[in-house]
Amino acid sequence: MEPLFPPWSDTVFRVCLVLAATGVLAMPVAAMLWVRTPYVTKQNDPVDQPVAFDHRHHVRDDGIDCLYCHYEAERSAFAAVPPTSVCMNCHSQVWQTSQRLAPVRASWFDDEPVHWQRVHQLPQFVYFDHSAHLSHGVGCVECHGRIDLMGQVHAVAPLTMSWCLACHRDPTPRLRPTNEITNMEWAPPPGTTRREAGEAVARQLHVDPPVSCTGCHR
Amino acid sequence: MTAHAEIPAVALPLLREEPTGGEEVLLTDESDLELTDRLLGPLWRQWPWFKYALAITGLGTLVLLLALTYTVLTGIGLWGNNIPVAWAFAIINFVWWIGIGHAGTFISAILYLFEVEWRTSINRFAEAMTLFAVIQAGLFPIFHMGRPWFAYWLIPYPSEMNVWPQFRSALPWDVVAVTTYFTVSLLFWYAGLLPDLAAARDRAPTLWRRRIYGIFALGWRGESWHWKHYRITYLVLAGIATPLVLSVHTNVSFDFAISQLPGWHSTIFPPYFVAGAIYSGFAMVLQLMIPARAVFGLQKIITRNHLDNMAKMLLVTGWVVTYAYIVEPFMAWWGGDTYEMYDMLVDRPLGPYAFVYWSVIFCNCIAVQSLWMKSWRTSPVRLWVVACLVQLGMWSERFMLIVTSLHRDFLPSSWRMYVPSWVDWTILGGTCSFFLFLFLLFLRFVPFIPISEIKEMRHAKSEEHARARFTVGRVEAPAAEVSRA
Amino acid sequence: MADVSRRVVLRLFGASAAVAGAEACSRGPQEYIVPYVNQPPEVTPSVATLYATAMTVDGYGMGVLATSHEGRPTKLEGNPEHPASLGALGTIEQGSLWGLYDPKRAQGIRHGENPATWNAIADVLARPAAGGKKTFVLLEPTSAPHLVDLVRRVRARSDVFVGFHTPLDRRNAWEGAKLAFGRVLEPRWDFSRADVVLSLDADFLGAAGTPQAWARAWASRRRIAGPNGAMSRLYVVEPRMSITGSSADERLAVQSRQVTSVAADVVAQVAPRGAARRESPWARWVGALARDLAAHPGASLVVAGDGQPPVVHAMAHALNEALGNVGHTVTYAPSPIFEAGEGSHGIEALAAAIDAGDIGLLVVAGGNPVYAAPADMDLEKRIRSLPASVYLGSHENETARACSYFVPEAHYLESWGDVLAFDGTASIAQPIIRPLVADARTPAQMLAAMLSRREATSHALVEEHWQSAPTGQDFATFWREALVHGIVPGGGTPAIDVRVSWGPVTRAVTAASVSPAPFEIVYFADGKVHGGRFAENEWLQELPDPVTRISWDNAALANDTTARSIAANTGDVVRLEIGGRSVVAPLFVLDGMADGVVALALGYGHEIPDRASTGVGSNAYALRRAKALWADDLQPSAASGTWELARVQEHESMEGRPIVLHKRLDAYRKDPGFARELNETPVTLYELQPPGEHQWGMTIDLNACTGCSACVVACTVENNVPVVGKTGVALGRVMHWLRIDRYAAGEMRGGATVVQPMLCQHCEKAPCEYVCPVNATVHSADGLNEMIYNRCVGTRFCSNNCPYKVRRFNYFQYNRDKPASLRLAMNPDVTVRDRGVMEKCTYCVQRIRQTEIRTRRDQRPIRDGEIQTACQQTCPTGAIVFGDIADKTTRVSAQMANPRVYQVLQDLGTLPRTRYLARIVNPNPELDT
């Protein structure tokens, strides 16, 4: 009677055992890594906008302050992508014939809003409030990165809950005087660390970010 | 003596005359070869009734799948649950099935450690039953959730939300308890199977079957060192499994005991639940074994002695449960808590769900008393009927504990009745079909009587007789010396 | 505006997808940001704006502050400056928001079956009716100055009659005034100065549309600070159990017709003036009452209800005069309603005109007369007999079917209007949103069209009236001030001095008979559909009736004796028959009803298919006779079958448990600390208070709470609480975060019931928290019991372990399948919960957090009372107080120190943050036996 299995079947069997064992361990780990990848968090992922708006030019060359366009940021939860009217403040004078601005003019004259692509996308059950952060010395750059160096805006922060909590639990290294909020290149005064500078701000503004769930989820 | 099981009717063999001398745990002295052939017989033979039985239970399993899918897609509003009765059938069935799943490990592990010999011919059976019951139980905690797709949040893992499960709650521990229990039971069962799978491999009629059994036999050749390692492994696993018998249902009882609801908030729950679990577990073993024993003509392997012993187990656990039924209202009265007194002394015995309470009392406390009579303990038919009653009683007990406690709690303004929906009933029936479906497959393809252990036991018995005679001789010798002196 | 709604819809898409939380493991959909093209200066996205406007209820004005999110009204609150509201709103006023977004609203103008244009209608209205016949315009009673103008001008067209009809008219009250004073006057009651109040079937605390100011004034005399404080005493004589009745200290249940005799007996005792009375069964009760009234001259008050015949009103006026109350607790002034008490009111005029055959065109502006007119009028047949009829209505309803032309009616939140409050204070009602129904018109625009001004906008019509009105300042300023404050400066019409002519009163007193009927039906308008006006309103239909706790139905209410003589029980179908007409209705046995009385709420039993109102309850109008609008002889009989009532509460007994603490005033004075032991903090080793700076807490004064349920609607609207429908409620899945429990308390006499608003107690040691396997409900630093929907997996363990059973579960997908129009009603500051998650009262945490952000931004502390929960804000009696209990200077801390304060189920050691002030009743010791 010929043998049931060829000699190599033991090896195959052992290999299978090892693979199965590792698979069981690797699968969840892979999933946990996956949700942290920039692909899922949409970090560094340039978004094509209906209008090729260049922050480098507007911020660096023209020296326009963030709050000129995002003028709601200090008093509202939304920083406000500016209404077309704000664009037209200047562009009814300058570049009024540029092809690149055609969509803006179309929006203005047809009373049709521009549909901008959302870059920083939070789940809808997160009630983020810009004004709360600006008024407590959190600079734009802390979350949005060097917008002034971006031709095409992309998210730098993962915007995951753990990322939010890291700062809410220890805000001081990310605080700055409120008059430096929009400064993309602010550095603490010489001889002081960011933490020291931040502690001063925290004392002055009674910074005490919520770590209870309803601080963000209502 | 081999059963002419081509007889399609399952009832006939049930009524067949029992072999005499029911006191023994083994009534055969067939040779090893004969035993092997006999016990492997069911695997090779064709059973005409099998495909019908499989088709029916398979259909039931399909219905279960549909019902569960429908629920997940639509919401558990399809069930009868409401506020205040937010837990109902799903949890009743969960506790019931997980309870049933307790007998297997109890028999195979604890009785093994205590070297109870009548365990041998039934343990494989009981273990398989355990596995299948735990599978049924496992369905409910997941599907009763409002958002089952997030069930993995109950598992502690480093989430990017920096949130962990709530370890003060009993539910995350349930996940651990049940999965551990299932894993260990599975290993235990499989380890025990190895020698018999090898036997099946060697006796299988066709090459393919030999191959398949061969793969699962993991190259068992019955060499002495195989047996050495096998024994150690089995003992160790038995050691691990034993505490689980207590831990699992203890933890399940915490799902209720940690709350402050009258009828749940009680320190007696852990022992009470474990006893109840073993109670319903043994009932289920009997419910399945008695027909199988008759169909496959195993009266000589599974003898009246087995029936007798298991009946006694029913009686014992039955009394533990009864004790709990007495203590609960007594403590309510003794503690003098208004809400508990209402629940225990008014709502359960006299309330709208009184019929459940009284059926519990009848099935679990009164019916089982018939087993004081040996005639009932050893009569397969009567014992089977009692076992069924106990099973029903234990399901009703969970209904009483869960629904009756919830539907009338502290504020009368929120008191409300619970009525199960057709989906509830479908899911309950579905799990029963699924359970039987798996069990049929087990009977068909796995040696459900531990052949090697039976053979071993037979040898042990004959040696015993021999040794007995020899010992008598030895005892006389010294006396002779004395007389010479 | 267009892009606003687009923006909003986008946000709501997100919001409803929110709790699914799929974002956790996948990239999620690409979202858009849609800014304004040209942002209105007053709008700051995410910051809600409040606009003052006014709602018209039965012709009277109620001041409203509408919350607007980027142009969407999402909530209505009372206007504190408005005399009828004082900041509070009742159930129907708050619920009226639904009507704006109602997906079943009539959408287009039509002629017969075919769509038509406004011009076509305007032509019909402008030209005289065919064949030289006349045009009849049927309006609802109105006080709107601009509308009154137009009525006058339309009447100048010689061929036009204008009449007024509402099923809930006040003609009884007006006739009563004529009887007593010889002219139409309306009493203005001041309960805050009354030690003894007698209500003759007047539901002044509960009836929808009554000024919330009354309830507030009454409650100011019930909230006693300590054992030595004084409180008023309320006597109620009524045929059915009303909210006022259940708040009574002494109550006499008699048939509606017998109220006259009771009143007569009181008059005979207080001010005989030669009136002769026979001995009556309630002599002892009346005697005690009369002595009590007489003992408080100038500080008592007798009020009569619209359901009572004129004589009762006359007697009430007479009593008030005899007791010297006039000028103290009651004053008189002309009715703000146009032509109050004149022949133009009532449906009879129309019927007569049609029968006379000289009507060529009927114009019905508002209301639903075909459904609501007395059955014996058979208005439908009469209208169908007309050559042409135009109907302006909010829905394609019974009247719409009977009329040849139909025009959708504009909702008051999308059109301009004006109205006078009960005291004559005028308000200008401004729209909050562009019309959602493009073709919608207002009654004023219909009249304007009859004056060939089809293009006139509602704005133009209102403005031109006020431009011509003497406002005493330049118009622009006046207009702005009026709109900002929601009231026209100058206040109400002054009270006038009148004397009762006793002749007719004394005659009536002598005449009044005491004989009861074997069976009597009593009609009433409940606080839900208000006679049918809100029958399509799912918020209000789902609201449990405050007295019966039935939602989605009306029922034939009768006490046990009556039920037994009809041989029926709760849930059985009974046939109610009057003069050949009959309806079937479910019987509901309710304690406190007078023997022989069967009460049936008006406004149910609509039969138009596929509506919220379809098949809900039974139609009382089908029985109503023009001669007996409020009470009538009845032949009830048991019919076959049963009727499932969706009841929110099925068990009325407290089972002797310490749930609603209540005591008689005298007993309370003997034992002031009776509640103390139920407010003790159990001994514990744990840290009791969380670390936060503020510690939020709430007290509810059961002495002030009447159970009117306004708070329930407020909570529903504020927190996007879904509607589950009749089947859902019947299965026990109602979603209300706040409910009004009602228990029998027989030993209390009076109303013999106690009510208790029950909401999340925010326990310091919350049983729900430690059983949640995923930390979806946890404790916040400021002591809130937080519920995080997006973390909830729905094991429902928390609900099982909640002793108060205030947690609610989304058994189905209640929100995502909503029509888009209803999504616009959602509050964007509160997550829209998805299927499979638990939810509950959050103390309106969105308001707390927003105020925190605002105040910290301004670097200032939160003022006491700056944060108001929705329920507290709208409570007419101010029973609910919310605030910081860590700060001992706050109102809530003061309340917590009140000796009456206690914790529900204190013995469980849950340490609730929500605490109750025990109810004290003030029965007349003279009536003890």
Image: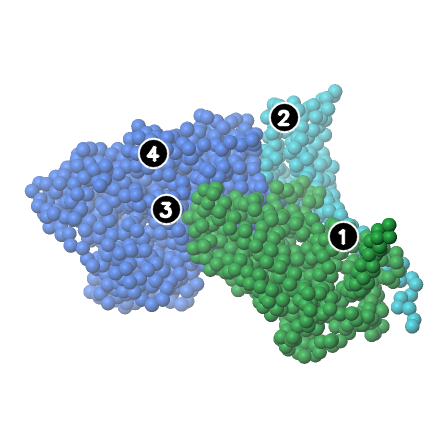
Q: How crowded is mark 3: few (under 14 residues within 10 Å), some or many (20 or more)?
A: many
Q: Which of C649 and A165 is in front in this view?
A: C649
The amino acid pointed to by label 1 is: Leu
Of labels 4 and 3, earlier in sequence is 4
Say what secondary structure mark 2 lies in.
helix
Q: Marks 4 and 3: same chain?
A: yes
Left or right relative to B228: residue C292: left
- At 57% from the left and 48% from the top, the residue drawn is B269
Are callouts 3 and 2 both on one chain? no
Proximity of marks 1 and 4: CB atoms separated by less than 8 Å:
no
Which of C912 and C696 lies nearest the eye of the viewer? C912
Q: Which picture quadrant has residue B186?
A: bottom right
* Disc number lying in front (4 or 3): 3
Give SS at disc 3. strand
- What is the distance, in whole Å, between disc 1 and disc 3 at their CAs? 59 Å
Q: Which of marks 1 and 4 is in front?
A: 1
Q: Which mark is residue C223?
A: 4
Q: Estimate how packed mark 4 is, as few (under 14), some (14 to 19) or many (20 or more) residues with alpha carbons within 10 Å.
A: many
Q: Mark 2 points at which residue?
A: A202
| Colour green maps to chain | B
In the rendering, which numbered label is found on residue B237? 1
Residues at discs 1 and 2 in contact (Cβ within 8 Å): no
Q: Which of the chains bears the disc numbered 4?
A: C
**Same chain letter for marks 1 and 4:** no
**Rendering coords of residue C167 (x, y %):** 28, 55
